[in-house]
Amino acid sequence: MPGTRDRIASIARPGWRAARTARRLRVLATAAALATGLASAAALARELPGFAELEAAGARIGAIRVRTLDVFDTADPAESGALFRAANALHVVTRPWLIERSLLFATGDPVSVKRIEETERVLRTTRSLYEVSIRPVAVVDGVVDVEVTTRDTWTFDPGLSATRSGGANANSYALREYNLLGTGLGISFGRFSNVDRSGNEFAIGGERLFGSTLSASFLQTNNSDGERLSARLLRPFHELDARWAAGVTASLDDRVDPLYRAGEIVARYRRREDRAEAFGGLSEGLVDGWVRRWSGGVSMQRDAYAAEPGFVAPPVLPADETLVAPFLRLEVIEDRFVTSRNLNQMGRPEFVAMGLQSTLQVGWASRSLGSTQDALLYAASVSRGFEPGPRQTLLASGRLDGRFADGAIERQRLGGQLQYFLPQARRWMFYAALSGDLLTRPGPLDMLTLGGDSGLRGYPLRYQTGTQRVLLSLEERLYTDLYWFRLFRIGAAGFIDVGRAWGGPNAGPESDRWLADVGVGLRIFSVRAAFSNVLHVDLAVPIDGPAGVKPVQFLVRTRTRF
């Protein structure tokens, strides 16, 4: 826009009116230049073929350019204020090499839409990235240059939070950095307090550590009732076409657990859990849209129980046990994903796994390896998505784990869930979720709980206990266009919950009936931060609630979804 800029120069003269006019014209000139540049880029994008067309033509990847952008786009007038500029100045942008090493394609590879789409899915699961764009920028003689552009999230979390659910309060304060100096490494330390315990916590680790295929973490928590330690070093199946995986994990958890009845603690006992696993796996990669992965290894689990001085102990404590078991695991994945918006998030792409995903693991615990009993250990999970009608989504999942010892099933848990999404208008969604669980021959302290902390929002936490549980939740969701301070998206919901937990020796008289509640809630999505939590603020009213249950429950919680 040289004519505009010449005009600015010609009227520059002393006086505040002239200076103000000059500033306005500079803004207009910048906006015009930006619009011209965007129009040219759009025209160029229209001229270039898409990745699908390039793949069909047999094109290959040429140069790959990576652009990592700051948290806020200060060229956008809505994000050009002093607050946004200060945030960018304090933030360390993700290192381009970290993105380069995470790409699932390289120079010289044939163009593959599947691998480009999977790369975007992988990058978008990274907490430190808000936006991801992969596009062709030049095509010459069957070679396509590719530009990968990412925009960061705000990754420093001061970690001050307070929550309330089921009539109980919890709070924490911590300092967390999810992308230390732009390297992808996370580190945190802080203090927490909840209904069960308080403690100090330190954690460090990361996925795809420093752009590699390794995942590592270490956690140490010193609690008011014990301690918790965990560590892992994995080379997972980091992509669908990955050919091998290996890793080791270990954890120790020493704590005092409560036993609830009608939302009140009736007993406490000390429990120590030690867990460890080493494994290796092989796969042929992605073949005809399917992935099959075989893994083998050894697992160890040790559980010890004891009465805790100063507290009423449960009537019966389980015997201590150790299970050391070589195992074999099979994982089957169907490569079928769809991209959606406004399901469990707001204003961001969501990649929904619609294909079959299943895992089966079988192990044998033997006294000869130090186990306290010979037992067949088994675990399985399965999930799949369906489209029962236009724009409708149904997600189904199930899980099973337990053991077979001395000719009988022991400590088996069977569970399943259905989730249904029905868009009704641009901003409205009907959501329904039905879940159920069943325990078979549980241990003395194995139980299912239901209350304000587990989906029955109008009741105290852990209000009902039993060996069977069913919960139905119906919601009418509103996804508004509100975008507060370019930081928070706002949603709302009206809901009804119906459920019950019952059966077994730990169930009390409060488990003799079905319970229901109705309520409304506000959803505040922190979309520009790596900790991208969803703040739930709910008011729930029990329907014909039993005596002793408050007529209104006020809940404030952070969740990862709507």
Image (cartoon, rainbow, N blue to C red):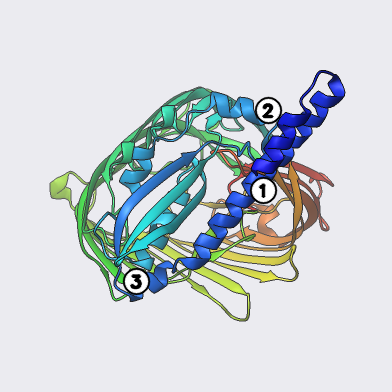
Q: Amino acid at mark 3?
A: Glu
Percent from the top left, x then y, of residue 102?
34, 47
Percent from the top left, x then y, of residue 254?
40, 30
Q: CA distance from mark 3 to mark 2?
A: 44 Å
Q: Identify the element where label 3 is drawn.
A: helix
Q: CA distance from mark 1 to mark 3?
A: 57 Å
Compared to 341, does 250 lie above or below? above
- Mark seen at residue 83: 2
Q: How many marks?
A: 3
Compared to 530, does 341 lie above or below? below
Percent from the top left, x then y, of residue 492?
76, 53
Label 2, residues with CA under 10 Å away: few <14, some 14-19, many ≥20? few
Q: Which residue is denoted by mark 1 in the rendering? A: 463
Q: Earlier in the sequence, mark 3 or mark 2?
A: 3
Question: Is residue 487 among the parts visible in the rendering?
Answer: no
Q: Identify the element where label 2 is drawn.
A: helix
